[in-house]
Amino acid sequence: MTRFIRGQFRHIPKVSTFAVDLTGKVVIVTGANVGLGYETAKHLATMNPAKLILACRTTATGNKAAADIARDTGCSTVVCWKLDISDAASVKAFVQRFEREGGGKLDILIENAGISNWDFKLAASGYEQTIATNHLGTAHLALRMLRFLLKADKPRLVIVASDVHYWVSDPNEADTPGVLQKLNEKGRKGKFYGQMNRYLVSKLFNVLFVRAFAAHLPPGTRLTVNSVNPGMCYSSLMRDVNPLLVAPTRVLARTTEVGSRMFVHAGVARELDGKSGQFLDSCKITEPSDFVISDRGASASRRLWTDTLVVLSGFDDQVPVAVNRYLQ
């Protein structure tokens, strides 16, 4: 907790200190209609991208966000495309649209879309909504967009994790057979499976999945895959949380603009060229939790990779095609 509080007050460099020219580059930010995603897209819009796609579940708010960003930054290439990352059909439709209209390559994919549910709900995929959105959907989009990323010069995949992955109760449960299916059982006993722990588990999965993804990249690839922690920000992620619980956090919370700087840094900073499989915090490579870097964590990472591919292959027969063709 002391580390967390200190981190909340750590200086975060301004985007101008690491900004780059994105002329000719295609960028996607998921969950970009509000909060951290919106501020991230707004920063990127100032760097002259060839196309900036706001991938949003609700097109009405997404179109408004695109219009506001265009007005405030002068960027004429920002658009909103519909994407509900918890729904495999929506992910497939988004990928098909990109194939038709995206221009053939993708330079930066920042996967920010996420939720925190305090009640057990199922997504369209049939999986618990927090895991379906924060992990399964995020992994699905990353794997389906892989072929477009690999056509870019120095592509980057950024998956938004969190420092709450340090706080997961009984993390060894992540290294048990069928953990994704167990998380789908309402009322399953054990701290790891509690709904209050679910968001933390999903962020642990983000870190473990990124490490596994990086390990499967073929030698010589220029694609980098990293996870990033924005710290606690007062954002729409807290929309489903009891207001009485949220109020005290506002003393420590960063603004979404400050938090978004870390997403932009992960997506464009030249100092991260060639760095992959890392956990980024406060615009620096940082050691993840003791569990993640342990032998048991390495085993959990491999298990999660395998189990995730099995689940996603059931949703989309192009997932194993992409994995077999582009990864080792």
Image (cartoon, rainbow, N blue to C red):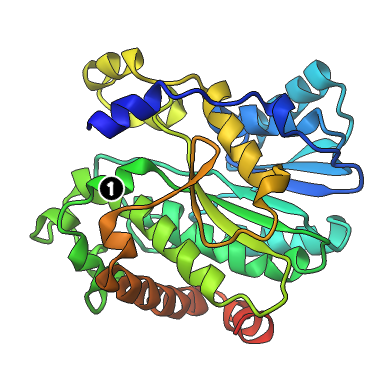
- Of 274 and 108, the residue lying toward us: 274
- Of 256 and 57, the residue lying toward us: 256
Q: Quadrant of the C terminus?
A: bottom right
**Vertical placement of 305 versus 5: above or below?**
below
Q: Amino acid at mark 1?
A: Tyr
Left or right: residue 64 versus residue 180 is: right
Q: Quadrant of the N terminus?
A: top left
Residue shown at 57% from the left, 28% from the top: 34
Left or right: residue 235 versus residue 178 is: right
Taking the image as drawn, is residue 87 in sight?
no
Name the element at disc 1.
helix
**Vertical placement of 294 versus 168: above or below?**
below
Left or right: residue 278 versus residue 38 is: left
Q: Residue 31, how many percent across, how many down? A: 58, 40
Residue shown at 49% from the left, 35% from the top: 282
Q: Residue 41, how many percent across, how many down? A: 69, 33
Q: Residue 94, how many percent across, how many down? A: 69, 57
Residue occupied by mark 1:
166
- Of 235 and 101, the residue lying toward us: 235
Picture quadrant of residue 250: top left
